Image: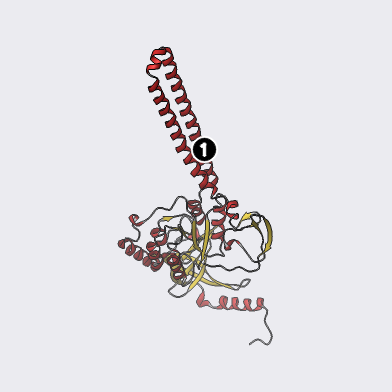
Amino acid sequence: MFNKALSVEELNHYIHSIFDAEEMLHGITVFGEVSGFKISGPHAYFTLKGANAAVSCNLFQYRKTYVPKDGDSILVKGSPDYYEKTGKLSFNVLSVQPVGVGQLHVELEKLKAKLLAEGIFDEAHKVAVPRFPKDVCVITSKTGAVIRDIYRTTRNVNQGINLHVYNVRVQGEGAENEIAGALRKSDGAFDVIIVARGGGSFEDLAPFNTEKVARAIYDCVTPVISAVGHETDFSLSDLAADARAATPTAAAHMIAYNEEEYIAAVFSLMSRIALASEKILHAEEDRFSGVVKSFIAGGGRLLDKNESRLRLSMHAIESAGKMFCTKKESVLEKLLLRYAGCNPLNILQKGYMSLSKDGKKVVSIGELYVGDEVTIRAKDGMAKALIKELKNEI
């Protein structure tokens, strides 16, 4: 047909002209289910899905017709459009007519009712998320923004929590198998498991609305936090989990306690104990002085008569004071030893080394990239190194 090579512009213009010339494609009505409906200014955009196909739709001046929502089955009237600049096919919608609730949402509600009847969502089965977790597993994509948000939020207040990333696909066909498998493999090895992904369309969140993932969460002995989508999104994984976070960042806030606040609280408690001990000792001294004065005032005969009793009283007071101080000193010593054990410099004395990048401590391979310059600190000095290879053990 053509005797020369076409430019992209010429090809797209030719395809566009075919759509314009085909009268059968103008003003047609198409049936499908709404997905990913979003509004931008005076216009709306969504995907119209069939059983095995989908088409992008443009609904200009959406207020002039019926406004659908995700999951609605609708009839749309309009014409297909081929945008020459990007080579994208879409459907320009002139009007929308509702038909009913979409089949995908109907099936989801049936599954939800089934799992509810089996007790998968029962509150009695849920366990509390520990207040001071040490090892946390995050099941998500290691390349997405979700894990970066969780790391940043956690490290803003806590450097001691160990964050482990279990890399899985969080959308697409077969993603539910990876997520369920990660839940089974990580169960029992951590203090908390976070299942996370960012926001998306109904299809993007589909793996978290599967029976396989919901049952895997229910079967976990380890507390599970579901942090899927945005605050308005609600999935079956949210219902099955022990706790739901509105966003992945909110999940980080749930597990990242502020180290400095608790250390300050411990030292404040120690100070109050010391002050209380001092007050008790002063009170005992004052009482002892009062006893001595009363004996002196009673005369020498009374003093002689009660000398033995006085010695017993003094001994009892002295023993009680020493016992009280010993108990308090033991409590203080245990607290100091516990927090001394958290000092990373003490760990270095045992032959371990500490790794940092850009002045921040590195606790997971997920924080490193090939080519990063890092600092290695040992008990007797520091060294600079360049990352040449990374290998994730999880």
Q: Is residue 304 depicted above or below 234 in this figure?
A: above
The front one of 207 and 67 is 207
The front one of 340 and 103 is 340
Q: In the rendered image, is residue 258 in sight? A: no
Where residue 146 sits, quadrant-wise, is bottom right
The front one of 116 and 387 is 387
Q: Is residue 290 depicted above or below 64 in this figure?
A: above
Q: Which colour scheme is used?
A: secondary structure
Q: How many numbered marks are there?
A: 1
Crowding at dot 1, Cα within 10 Å, few <14 / some 14-19 / many 20+, comes out as: few
The front one of 95 and 301 is 301
Could you tell me the amino acid type at mark 1?
Answer: Ser
In the image, taking residue 46 as reference, residue 5 lies left or right, namely: right
| Residue at the extreme left of the image, as rendered | 117
Coordinates of residue 108 in the picture (x, y in percent): 38, 65
List the residue tagged with mark 1: 268
Secondary element at tag 1: helix
Q: In the rendered image, is residue 274 in sight? A: yes
Q: In which quarter of the image is the N terminus?
A: bottom right
Coordinates of residue 249 in the picture (x, y in percent): 52, 54
Q: Is residue 245 depicted above or below 80 in this figure?
A: above
Where residue 315 sits, quadrant-wise, is top left
Say which residue appears at 47% left-offset and 41% top-offset: 330
Coordinates of residue 37 in the picture (x, y in percent): 49, 62
Coordinates of residue 133 in the picture (x, y in percent): 47, 53
